[in-house]
Image (cartoon, helix red, strand yellow):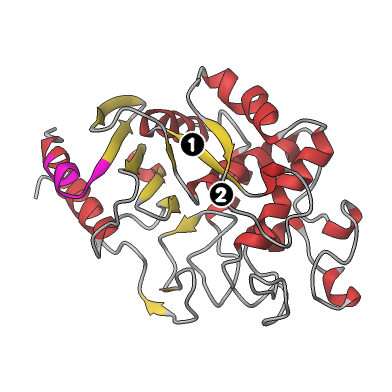
């Protein structure tokens, strides 16, 4: 199978790295820039795995209400509404809040991509393990997989809502090679139970059926994008199989798993390079052409 067209696409589209594993075997691992980069919201997919491991260790349940774990009045909601927020509503982005943690919709129903509320998941993990985010990532995930280049780093930004540790606003720095290794371990159920893995891509709301638990899916009949209330028709990647799930970050970073094809694709982008419009579709058009031979 000729994967070379991806190299030409990567050169054209300012990829930093691309790594592909198919049927358990690496078929591509190429770097235009051999260094770690902030993969932005791909970290959400990584964090979802840590939550699954924590649940498997009986440290928490995704149905837990946040106010059972942290002090109340961390939002601008009424006490009654704030008490409804669970780990799962944070993961499905259905907190009913905007980025100022003010009411905007119905809890459990309205989809709003909320980076500020999401940070509380990091806080919950640290509280329940007694470990820093970096320590538990290393002990639970990175060290068992033999990965040494992935780490959490504080971002040079702050929020008026960040009243805890530096890990509240933090970036995950990694390489396509290591992201692919994590994706392959997730695909083969080496990290979390198969049932939890399946739940990552299950629709978390009727408003945006293409978002699950911190991962995107590809079977939703409509989808929304961060920062917009518009619904777009069709799956995000109509050329790709419907069982695809992906963790995507600003700038074109992604970790994608297609169980039916036994395929894992990880891509990072050059820093400060804006991806072309339709970059994801160009990537997956190319991948599917390679796989199908036309």
Q: Residue 137, relative to residue 160: is it above or below?
A: above
| Span of residues in magenta | 8-15
State the SS at label 1: strand
Q: Residue at x 73, y 55 (%)?
A: 162
Residue 174 sits inside the magenta stretch: no
x then y, percent, for residue 227: 49, 73
Circle 1 sits on which residue? 173
* Residue 263 visible from this viewpoint: yes
Q: Residue furthest left?
A: 294
The number of discs equals 2
Residue 36 is drawn in which quadrant? top left
Q: Residue at x 70, y 63 (%)?
A: 89
Crowding near pointer 2: few (<14 within 10 Å), some, many (20+)? many
Q: Is residue 3 left or right of residue 201?
A: left
Crowding near pointer 1: few (<14 within 10 Å), some, many (20+)? some
Residue 10 sits inside the magenta stretch: yes
x then y, percent, for residue 201: 52, 55
x then y, percent, for residue 25: 32, 24
Circle 2 sits on which residue? 44
Q: Residue at x 82, y 54 (%)?
A: 64
Q: Residue 47, relative to residue 205: is it above or below?
A: above
State the SS at label 2: helix
Sequence-wise, the earlier of marks 2 and 1 is: 2
x then y, percent, for residue 215: 52, 54
Q: Residue 28, relative to residue 211: is it above or below?
A: above
What is the spatial separation of the Cα atoms under label 2 and label 1, in whole angstroms?
A: 12 Å
Residue 282 is drawn in which quadrant? bottom left
Residue 71 is drawn in which quadrant? bottom right
Q: Main secondary structure of the magenta part?
A: helix
* Residue 65 visible from this viewpoint: no
Camera-side residue of 288 and 174:
174
């Amino acid at each position: 199978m000729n994967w070379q067209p991806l190299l030409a696409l990567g050169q054209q589209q300012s990829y930093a790295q691309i790594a592909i594993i198919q049927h358990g075997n690496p078929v591509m691992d190429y770097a235009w820039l051999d260094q770690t980069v902030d993969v932005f919201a791909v970290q959400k997919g990584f964090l979802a795995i840590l939550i699954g491991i924590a649940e498997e260790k009986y440290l928490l349940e995704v149905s837990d209400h946040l106010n059972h774990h942290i002090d109340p009045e961390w939002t601008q909601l009424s006490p009654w509404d704030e008490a409804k927020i669970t780990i799962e509503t944070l993961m499905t982005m259905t907190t009913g809040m905007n980025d100022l943690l003010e009411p905007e919709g119905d809890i459990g129903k309205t989809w709003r991509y909320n980076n500020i509320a999401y940070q509380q998941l990091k806080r919950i993990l640290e509280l329940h393990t007694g470990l820093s985010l970096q320590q538990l990532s290393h002990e639970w995930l990175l060290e068992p997989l033999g990965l040494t280049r992935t780490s959490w780093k504080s971002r040079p930004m702050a929020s008026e809502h960040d009243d805890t540790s530096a890990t509240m606003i933090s970036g995950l720095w990694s390489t396509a090679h290591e992201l692919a290794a994590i994706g392959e371990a997730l695909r083969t159920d080496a990290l979390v139970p198969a049932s939890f893995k399946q739940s990552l891509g299950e629709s978390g709301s009727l408003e945006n059926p293409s978002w699950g638990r911190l991962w995107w899916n590809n079977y939703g009949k409509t989808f929304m994008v961060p920062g917009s209330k518009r619904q777009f028709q069709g799956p995000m990647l109509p050329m790709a199989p419907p069982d695809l799930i992906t963790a995507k970050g600003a700038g074109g970073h992604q970790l994608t798993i297609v169980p039916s094809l036994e395929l894992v694709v990880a891509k990072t982008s050059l820093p400060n390079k804006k991806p072309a419009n339709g970059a994801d579709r160009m990537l997956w058009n190319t991948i599917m052409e390679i796989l199908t031979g036309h």
